Amino acid sequence: MFWTSYLLAVLAIVLAWPVPILLSRASWPARSPFTAMLLWQAIALAGGLSMIGAMLVYGLEPIGDNLISGLRGLADMVLFNAPTTALGFWHLFALSAAALLTAHLVFTLLLTYYKIERQRRRHRELLALLAAPSTDAARTVVISHDSPVAYCLPGGARSVTVLSDGLMAALEPAELRAVLSHENAHLNQRHHLLLWAFAAWRQALPWLPTTRLAQEAVNSLIEMLADDVALKSESKATLIKAIAIVASGPTGGMTAGMGRGWWEAWRPPPYRPRTPALPWTGLRRPPAPSQVLPAPPFPGSAGCCPLSRSCLPPPAVWCLPAALCSWPCLPPC
């Protein structure tokens, strides 16, 4: 298990820096957004598990030949007061850091979910007061606003798509169907769960480049996936025109007032791949017109000795020197 801990530490470092940077600069994700989305999820999951695993495996190395026996030995120490003399300082440090990082990630994930759900509940209450059900589409409400606005509000059986009067007046029937298909794709494919997970990951580890790059990329990829769904029922020209009309709406005014603080805190920055041309249009993609996390439309982060156990620092020092100091980095209230 000794060398396994160092291999996991190397994997964590690779997934934290060079791999996400190379992927964020690649041009192929625009041609295959689903594959790119899976790859970003794999990087995030493998990176987190390798960071925790490197410290855990190193800490358990003196009390077991494999992970299972090591966990059994640790359980005996915690539950049955077995002697802990086999564990040195760095082993205890690694186990403590692994437990702290795990608790930090889980706590931030739950806290992020609570904050998002609280804001969505408030948003839904405002829509109940200020919006009217659409007569043209199910699970769709219309707000009285002259600017083109379209977004979806996730909530299970209460999920709705929100449109404005200005948008419905500006779109032709086929363009409106393209917009509705795009927004419904966000809801049907549960894109809000991806945004929640990657937002929580970034809030938990803001100093890790992977978290920022992954959130920016996922924000763009979900729009590409929704566009692909809309293209199954509408033409390319229709979708391009609909996107251009929706994107022409003001963004500053739509997020002003009581919802602005939450939107600025949770909305990821726009993702700009090195080659942003759409494979099926040859045009540059306009700014994403809609977000799964909605913006309320109303006012209101060489040693000289040979490789041996005596000269290698523990994986906890390699992976997470900032694990303890990142604990205060929680989502803003």
Image: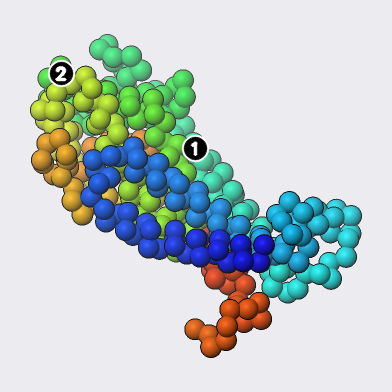
Element on which disc 2 rests: helix
Q: Which residue is mark 2?
A: 174
Q: Amino acid at mark 2?
A: Ala
Q: Is any part of residue 216 visible from this angle?
A: yes
| Position above or below: 258 against 22 | above
Q: Which residue is mark 1?
A: 118
Residue 320 is situated, as x and y percent measured from the top left of the image, at 55, 67
Residue 264 is situated, as x and y percent measured from the top left of the image, at 35, 49
Circle 1/circle 2 CB separation < 8 Å: no
Please give the name of the residue rendered at 28% of the width and 14% of the height, measured from the top-left corner: 137
Please give the name of the residue rendered at 58% of the width and 67% of the height, measured from the top-left corner: 6
| Position above or below: 271 against 191 | below
Judge depth for marks 1 and 2 and give the one in front: 2
Residue that sits furthest to the top in the current view: 135
Residue 200 is situated, as x and y percent measured from the top left of the image, at 48, 48
Crowding at dot 1, Cα within 10 Å, few <14 / some 14-19 / many 20+, comes out as: few
Please give the name of the residue rendered at 49% of the width and 37% of the height, measured from the top-left corner: 118
- Answer with left or right where residue 283 lies relative to residue 304: left
Q: Is any part of residue 272 visible from this angle?
A: no
User: Can you tell which mark lies on residue 300?
Assistant: none
Find residue 212 and report its image quarter: bottom left
Find residue 65 and report its image quarter: bottom right
Towards the viewer: 309 or 318: 309
Q: For the residues marked 1 and 2, what is the alpha-carbon distance in whole angstroms? A: 35 Å
Q: Amino acid at mark 1?
A: Arg
Crowding at dot 2, Cα within 10 Å, few <14 / some 14-19 / many 20+, comes out as: some
